[in-house]
Amino acid sequence: MASLDRVKVLVLGDSGVGKSSLVHLLCQNQVLGNPSWTVGCSVDVRVQDYKEGTPEEKTYYIELWDVGGSLGSASSIKSTRAVFYNSVNGIMLVHDLTNKKSSQNLYRWSLEALSKDSSPTRVIVSNGDYDREQFAENSVPLLLIGTKFDQIAETKRTEVLTRTAFLSEDFNAEEINLDCTNPRYLAAGTSNAVKLSRFFDKRRDISQETRVR
């Protein structure tokens, strides 16, 4: 695997939204039976075929960096996390569809990861304020992932999906909504699987461009 191209993708979001379960499903194609809290950062690897089924197809691997979700205001927490934010090719922003606050906090997560200074001890995070234009020239692509879709009541789904559509627009990102305990949401041929492959392929393109420069 060392000879394959490498792509680094951050997985960010509040504690309890299901990041570890998502990463396990993406990398092992299995449901995580007993998820636990992530302390610091956990890294798993997914093997991916770039532009599968085309003459350009090439196998590479994706490192998914599952960053612990304590969003506390302590600067020491942020500065510690900053070491994980270097040389990133893409970011998955994960939120719990049944928890509106976890969705709102994605603005702060994006600010923390994308506004970091060159020094890992100086991460800049605003007090929840988000200016869409601030990251207009951001070169790190984003993917918005909503979890626990199965737990949304039928009568609430339209309301929730309307809210996530606004999030997707703010981040200029495609969105995937799923249940991490059911692999069918990412089954081959589904719209979610297509969006995921498109996201990973773009991340490899970004990685290659960075390497050439």
Image (spheres, rainbow, N blue to C red):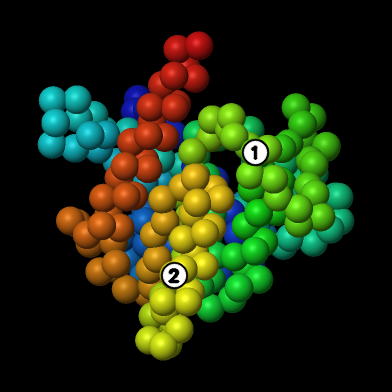
Quick check: 7 left or right of 96?
Answer: left
At horizontal 67% and vertical 61% (from top left) the residue drawn is 105
State whether residue 61 is above or below residue 4.
Answer: below
Q: CA distance from mark 2 to mark 1?
A: 24 Å
- Is residue 11 among the parts visible in the rendering? no
Q: List x then y, in percent, for residue 54.
A: 14, 31
Q: Quadrant of the N terminus?
A: top left
At horizontal 41% and vertical 21% (from top left) the residue drawn is 208
Please count the marks in the image: 2
Residue that numbered label 2 is attached to: 161
Residue that numbered label 1 is attached to: 133
Q: List x then y, in percent, for residue 71.
A: 74, 60
Quick check: 39 left or right of 162?
Answer: right
Within-10-Å neighbours for mark 2: few <14, some 14–19, many 20+: some
Q: Which circle's residue, 2 or 1, is located before the other in the chain?
A: 1
State whether residue 164 is above or below residue 61.
Answer: below
Where disc 1 sits, the SS reads helix
Q: List x then y, in percent, for residue 181.
A: 37, 74
Q: List x then y, in percent, for residue 190.
A: 22, 59
Picture quadrant where residue 117 is located: top right
At horizontal 41% and vertical 40% (from top left) the residue drawn is 62
- Which label belongs to residue 119? none
Where disc 2 sits, the SS reads helix
Within-10-Å neighbours for mark 1: few <14, some 14–19, many 20+: few
Residue type at mark 2: give it: Leu
- Is residue 207 among the parts visible in the rendering? yes
